[in-house]
Image (spheres, grey):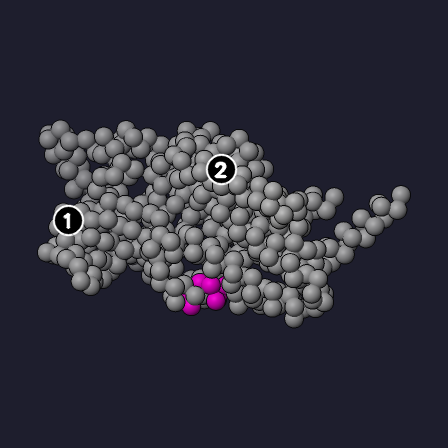
Amino acid sequence: MRAFIIGVILVITYVLQSTVLQYIELWNIKPNLIVMLVIYFALLRGNVEGGIVGLFGGMLLDILSGKVFGLYALIGMYIGVLAGNFNKRFFKENYLVALLFTFIFTIIYEFIFYFFNYFIWGETRIIYVFKNIIIPEVLYNCFLAVPIYSFVIKINNWLEIKEKRSRKY
Amino acid sequence: MPSFLKNKYILALILTTLIIFIFMGISATNRPTVTLFEDVVGVVVSPIQKIFFSIGKNAQNFIQFITEIKTLKQQNERYLREIDELKEENRKLQALKDENERLREMLGLKDRFDKFEIIGAQIIAKEPGNWFNVFTIDKGTADGLQKNSAVITSKGLVGHIYEIGINRAKVISVIDSNSAVSGLIVRTRDIAVVKGDLTLQKDGLCKMSYISKDADIIPGDLIETSGLGGIYPKGLLIGKIKATKKEPYEISKYAIVEPVVDFKRLEEVFVIKNTEAALQ
């Protein structure tokens, strides 16, 4: 049940990301909703679920939009695992924590992506990349962090209640 | 066995990583089409993307219509005047065209574009991130397309197909930093490489590198495909030179190229079906 619902959410998010999101670009930058979902599920549910959501979200990106299969999937999985490792140390339903996580893990995610796609191939203008791509995207993600985190919390609570009920019988 | 391998989660992480590495290797090879699994995902998601893409497009068109309604009347009057002028010019050009055809026939030249067999395609998705300049179209192997088919609009070159499934194909545009096209400067007949550039692609521009130092190029020069390189047929318009710059410490120079295609507003494209025949 949980896997199915999260799968559907990932597909819808991917579709939005690849179609209508280009119309709400700011300074030619769009937010990265998939990585936000990965971070929030990791924050709420720990590193195993974070890793799995990251893996499948990444695979969706790889199959439907990527250049080489596997890069998005691997980065997604490791970001999920990494973010999930902190999930016991923070009060989870705190929006400041979500904001902090969005900020830090979007930077890490985009930097790893840049590193493997460009830096090792000789595109080393790292200051330009940070100034014009990574930082604007991080800020845009942080701007959307509160509504999206509250959506993920709602979905997660709903799923947890359902799971508890089905465990009783 | 090292102790960390006893943790089943870490073991699963390592195994998944290795499996993905294997698939990465397979997908990086020069495979003609995608795997069945990728096709299944594509068949399921493509129709949904198509719907959402058109919703976004229509919403944008509507907002544009509202904001532009004031200027439309003035524009309309201007266009009507222009139409009259163009009609007159068209008549003159038609005469020239007839003459040209007659002369060509005499010389035995065939119009090279007659050889192209093109098929229209809709864009159903654009790049979900902020790094690449790739998009997805709604035609695939079922419509007779294949990997490396050239993609154009009525204006000029867009790019080529780099991955293809049954009902969808991923297209890399010429401004993506992984793209390289052999270009010919029409006026001077110089040949150089038109490459995408990470810093230029956000403005919809690309770069023409390795132009010989002596080449007499000026802003405004038109660039078309040279036909070298094996993917793009000869004679497709790429764009025009916007500025020329000297490469520091190097014997060549480079130019900033403004493509004729507006990649931000791309919605429909044409794919050249018989790229191989057109190349010969």
Numbered range of the magenta stretch: A131-137
Where does residue B73 sit, x and y in percent of width and height? 41, 63
At x 43%, y 56%, the residue is A115
Where does residue A28 sit, x and y in percent of width and height? 44, 62
Is A65 part of what is drawn in magenta? no
Say above or below: B253 vs B93.
below
Residue A45 visible in image: yes
Residue at the disc numbered 2: B22
- Describe residue B3's horizontal placement relative to residue B98 as left or right: right
- Describe residue B104's horizontal placement relative to residue B159 as left or right: left
Say above or below: B246 vs A162.
below
Q: Assign a secondary structure to mark 2.
A: helix
**Residue found farthest to the bottom:** A96
Residue at the disc numbered 1: B190
Is A136 part of what is drawn in magenta? yes
What is the three-letter code of the residue carrying label 1? Asp
Q: Chain of mark 2?
A: B
> Which is more toward the observer, B197 or A113?
A113
- Describe residue B84's horizontal placement relative to residue B95 as left or right: right
What is the three-letter code of the residue carrying label 2? Ile
Q: CA distance from mark 2 to mark 1?
A: 43 Å
The quadrant in which the C terminus of chain A is found is top right
